[in-house]
């Protein structure tokens, strides 16, 4: 049978390398999600829904003018999502969690950095302005 390397020659050596690469990717994206969660906790105008357990982060923007107004926050998230998507740089997903509207990002791209995530937060702030 064919192995991940494409043929039988050296395939046994390729499997551990592929396993290591996959493990490294999973660890890296989970670590980046944890760092993004820390960024959200430190930002006074964002809320983190739950601590990420993997590479998925659920959050929402909470401008001061909407703080404490659940209905306004729920209405704002889809508007921000649409504006950010239309700008073409980021693609947050909308999710309903606990009866509230949140944004979600799944970190998969190996080239994504904390700087990109900071830019996402800035894009959401600009969309709310």
Image: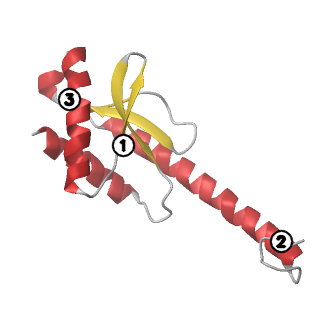
Q: Which mark is residue 76?
A: 3
Q: Which mark is residue 3?
A: 2
Q: CA distance from mark 1 to mark 3?
A: 21 Å
Quadrant in the rendering for residue 49? top left
Nearest to viewer (mark 2 / mark 3): 2
Q: Position of residue 86 (x, y in %)?
A: 21, 51
Looking at this view, is 99 or 64 the one in front?
99
Q: Is residue 109 left or right of residue 117?
A: right
Q: CA distance from mark 2 to mark 3?
A: 49 Å
Residue 74 in sight in this render = yes
Q: Position of residue 45 (x, y in %)?
A: 23, 33
Secondary element under disc 3, as helix, strand or loop, is: helix
| CB within 8 Å, label 2 to label 3 | no
| Residue plotted at (57% across, 36% down) | 53
Q: Is residue 105 left or right of residue 84?
A: right
Looking at this view, is 74 or 26 the one in front?
74
């Amino acid at each position: 049978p064919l192995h991940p390397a494409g043929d039988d020659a050296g395939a046994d050596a390729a499997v551990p390398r592929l396993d290591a690469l996959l493990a490294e990717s999973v660890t890296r994206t989970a670590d980046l999600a944890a760092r993004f969660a820390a960024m959200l906790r430190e930002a006074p105008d964002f809320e983190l829904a739950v601590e990420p357990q993997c590479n998925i982060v659920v959050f929402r923007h909470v401008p001061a003018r909407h703080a404490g107004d659940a209905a306004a926050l729920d209405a704002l998230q889809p508007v921000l999502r649409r504006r950010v998507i239309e700008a073409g740089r980021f693609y947050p997903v909308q999710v309903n969690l606990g009866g509230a509207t949140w944004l979600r990002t799944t970190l998969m791209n190996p080239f994504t950095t904390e700087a990109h995530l900071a830019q996402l937060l800035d894009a959401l702030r600009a969309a709310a302005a």
